[in-house]
Amino acid sequence: MADYYAIIYDLTTSIYEKATLELSSTGTGTATFVVYTGGGSSTTGTANFNTSYYVSSESSSITNLFTPSSGASALVKGSASVAAGAFLRQWSNTHDAGYYVPPSTQSLGTAFRLPASKGTTASKLLIGNPGTRSITVSVFYGSSSSASVTQTIVAHNFAEIALSETEKAVRVTATGSAFVQLAVDLGGEYDISFVLPE
């Protein structure tokens, strides 16, 4: 079984916002899509891979991943026994984003590093907790041993943390398995990518 976790990020307050998770596979089978909406609630949909080994959450009962969360950002999961790749698309009438989603075997960890680039003051860390227990995450800048931010993330939820400094190394630690995405507002377009664990 391969699992793919990501955070659909509320790019705008537009009512036209939509998101889908697409999976490729090595054969036919059924994919499961889950949207975790906080407070222990979730919505699940299933869909079959077509004969070209492709499936989208749009083909399940969750035609828009933003619907269960009423348009708010949310943690989502796609999984299938034959899954071999994932891509998340989200768009509205003003913003677009699309990016590759690595499998959980590559994305989950407890320590992450990235540079806070020059001029990216609009950057945000999206830190997901796909587990069944709360975890605590901390964000450090440069060589500091004192956390700039410490936050608890409950099960199947995420934290959105703005990067407050630039041109410094950023280190993220977690007390349990987590994944980290970096979202940068480029003005009408978002650059969203995964930060792989150490």
Image (cartoon, rainbow, N blue to C red):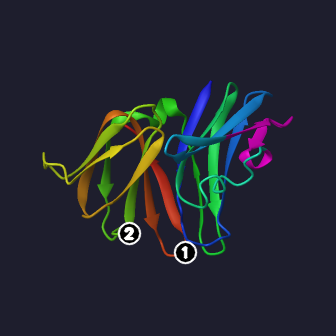
Quick one: SS at disc 2?
A: loop
Residue 88 or 129: which is nearer the viewer? 129
Q: Is residue 133 left or right of residue 28?
A: left
Residue farthest toward the right in the current orientation of the protein: 51
Residue 50 picture location, percent across and down = 84, 37
Q: Quadrant of the N terminus?
A: top right
- Residue drawn at point x = 30 percent, y = 40 percent: 136
Dot 1 surroundings within 10 Å: few (below 14), some, or many (20 or more)?
Answer: few
The residue singled out by tag 2 in the image is 122
Residue type pointed to by label 2:
Ala
Q: Is residue 130 left or right of residue 84?
A: left
Residue 150 or 163: which is nearer the viewer? 150
Dot 2 surroundings within 10 Å: few (below 14), some, or many (20 or more)?
Answer: few
Residue 196 picture location, percent across and down = 41, 41
| Depicted 182 relative to depicted 108: above or below | below
Examine the rendering and report whether any part of residue 164 can be seen: yes
Q: Earlier in the sequence, mark 2 or mark 1?
A: 2
Residue 137 picture location, percent across and down = 30, 43
Residue 76 picture location, percent across and down = 57, 44
- Residue drawn at point x = 31 percent, y = 61 percent: 163
Quick one: SS at disc 1?
A: loop
Q: Is residue 88 left or right of residue 134?
A: right
Q: Say the numbered circle drawn on residue 188.
A: 1
Count of numbered circles in the view: 2
Residue type pointed to by label 1:
Gly
Q: Which residues are magenta?
A: 44-59
Give the distance between the C-alpha atoms of the residues marked 2 and 1, in whole angstroms. 13 Å
Magenta span includes 56: yes
**Quarter where residue 161 is shown:** bottom left
- Residue drawn at point x = 30 percent, y = 54 percent: 115
Magenta span includes 46: yes
- Residue drawn at point x = 32 percent, y = 62 percent: 117
